[in-house]
Image (cartoon, rainbow, N blue to C red):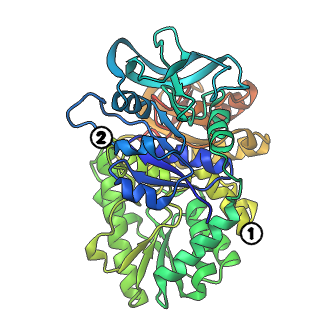
Amino acid sequence: MQRPILILNFGSQFTQLIARRVRQAQVFSQVLSCEASLAEIQAVNPVGIILSGGPADVEGADAPQADPGIFSLGVPVLGICYGMQLMAATLGGRVEKAQKGEYGLAQVTLDTESHLFAGLKQDSNSWMSHRNQVTMLPAGFTATASTATCPVAGMEDRERRLFGVQFHPEVTHSDQGEQIIRRFVLDICGCEQTWRMDSFAETAIADIKQAVGEGTVLLGLSGGVDSAVVAALIQRAIGDRLYCVLVDHGFMRKNEVRLAAQVFTAHFPVHLSAVDASDRFYQKLQGVTDPERKRKIIGAEFVEVFKAEARKLGALDHFAQGTIYPDVIESGAVPGSVTIKSHHNVGGLPEQLGFTSLIEPLRTLFKDEVRELGRVLGLPPEMTDRQPFPGPGLAIRTLGELTREKVSITRESDAILLEEIEKAGHSQHLSQFFAVNTNLRSVGVMGDGRSYDTAIAIRAVTTDDFMTADWARIPYELLAKISRRITNEVPGVNRVLLDVTTKPPASIEWE
C-alpha cells in the first residue's frame, strides 16, 4: 500500500472532510488522533501530514497537543485553522485572541508567489471559523495570506516545507480550497494518484469477510442509499448469510416500505423481513416534542425491534448498519467534537443486543462517496441516486408531538414535492430536498371560508459533502406549482414556505 497522507485529528467536525478531499485527489489518507505518539506516526510512514482544525483555544490549559517531533520528520506539514495556530505556538510564534472573529465566508488575499498558493488567483472567498489568530510568526516563516481583520491568514517555511492556513480549504464553499489541498498533496508531497473507489470496495469486502468469518449478519434496512450499499457490500462478502430487516416505524415516505422490499428482493439474494412496528413507536413517542428525545426514543425502539427480530431469525452473530461520517460527526463521536444531534444508528453496540460485533463499512465515507461506491458495486440508479432519508424518517420532519394525522400531512406533501421536482427534471440540480411539517398553524382563506391550518416548509440544498450546504434556487414557476398542489391536495395545509438558510448556521434536517 502506498504511503499515506496522515491527518491528525484535533476534534474538528471537518477532519474526515479533509480526508475526503485528499481521496478526491486519488491519494490514500489515514486519520489518527492528535494524541498519537511519534512512534505511532512514524510507523504509518506518512508522505505528508495535515493538522486539522478544532474547537479548543490553543493557549488553553486543556488544549489538545501533538508531539512536536512531527515538525522534524522531514515530511511536509500543513496546519489548518487550529492546526496552523498549534504549529505557530509550538515553533515559537504567538497566538492571541483577536478583537473580531471571522465566521463564514471571508475574502482572503493570497501571496501567489508563495509555494502553497502558486498558480492560484490572488483573491479567494474562503471559509473562516476562528477568533484566535497568529500575531507573531515563528522564525523562518513568512505570511502568505491575509484578510481585512487577520493579517496572518496563511504562513509557510518553504525550506522546512511547513505550511499553515487560517481558513478551511477542505470546505466546499472555499473557492480554491480543493486546488490548495491538491497542491499540497500532489505537488509539495509528491503523492501518486493511485487511490480508487474500486480499491475501497475490495478492501471493505475483505474486511467484512475477515470480521464475519463463517458467521451471519443482521442488517437494518432504512430503504435509503446507505443501507442499500451496505447490503451490497455484505452480500458480496458473505452471500446468503446476510439477513435484512426493514422496520416500518410509521415514519417512512409514501410507498417506501413496498418499494424498498421490491428493490431489495430484486437485486439481492438475501433474507428480507419487513416489520410493521408503527404502533409501538407512536405509543412511545406520545406527548414527546423535544427533537433529541424523539431521536433517542426511536433509536432505543429500533434496538428492541431488532432484538425481537433476531430472536425470530435464530442466533445471528453480527449486526450491521449504514452509518456514514456526517452521522458520526454530528453525534459527537469524534473526540473533541460537539454533539449537534443524535443518530439512532451511531454509537457503541448495546450489549443487550446480543451480537458479537458491529459492522459499519461506510463509517468513513461521505454521501456522494457512498453513491459512487454503489455504482462501483453495480447498483441501479434508482438506488444510488435516490434522496437521502434519515433513520428516524418523517418523525424529524414533523415538528412537535407526533400523530398519524400530522405525519400523513408531511408524507403527502413530501410525495408531491418529490414528484414535481423529478417531473421537472430538476432533481439532478439538488443534493437533497424534502417537506417539513412546521407544526405552525396560520389563518388562510379557502373557498369562501376561513382556515386555520398547517404551514409546510420546503427544504432543498446543494452540497457535495453534506458538511456545509447552500439553499437551492428552485425556479419560481416550479415552486408555485408545488405550492398549489400541496395546498389543494393535502387536507390541513394552507401555507407553503421556502427555507433559505445555509448549513451552517442551520443543519440540513430541521430536527
State which quadrant residue 430 falls in.
top right
Q: Which residue is painted at 74% across and 27% down in the image?
A: 475
Q: Measuring from the top left, give residue 139's x and y in whole percent.
A: 43, 22
| Left or right: 409 in relation to 98 | right
Numbered label attached to residue 497: none
Q: Along the line of sight, which residue is nearer the eye, 95 or 361?
A: 95
**Tag 2 residue:** 64
Residue occupying image coordinates x 43% and y 63%: 249
276, above or below 28, in the image: below
Task: Of the two numbered discs 1 and 2 on the same chain, state the one appearing first in sequence.
Answer: 2
* Disc 2 crowd, CA 10 A, few/some/many (<14, 14-19, 20+): many
Q: Secondary structure at mark 1?
A: loop
Instruction: Residue 487 in the image: state x and y as whole percent.
Output: 60, 34
* Residue 367 can be seen in this image: yes
3D distance between C-alphas at marks 1 and 2: 43 Å
**What amino acid type is highlighted by mark number 2?**
Pro
Does 240 sit above or below residue 248? below
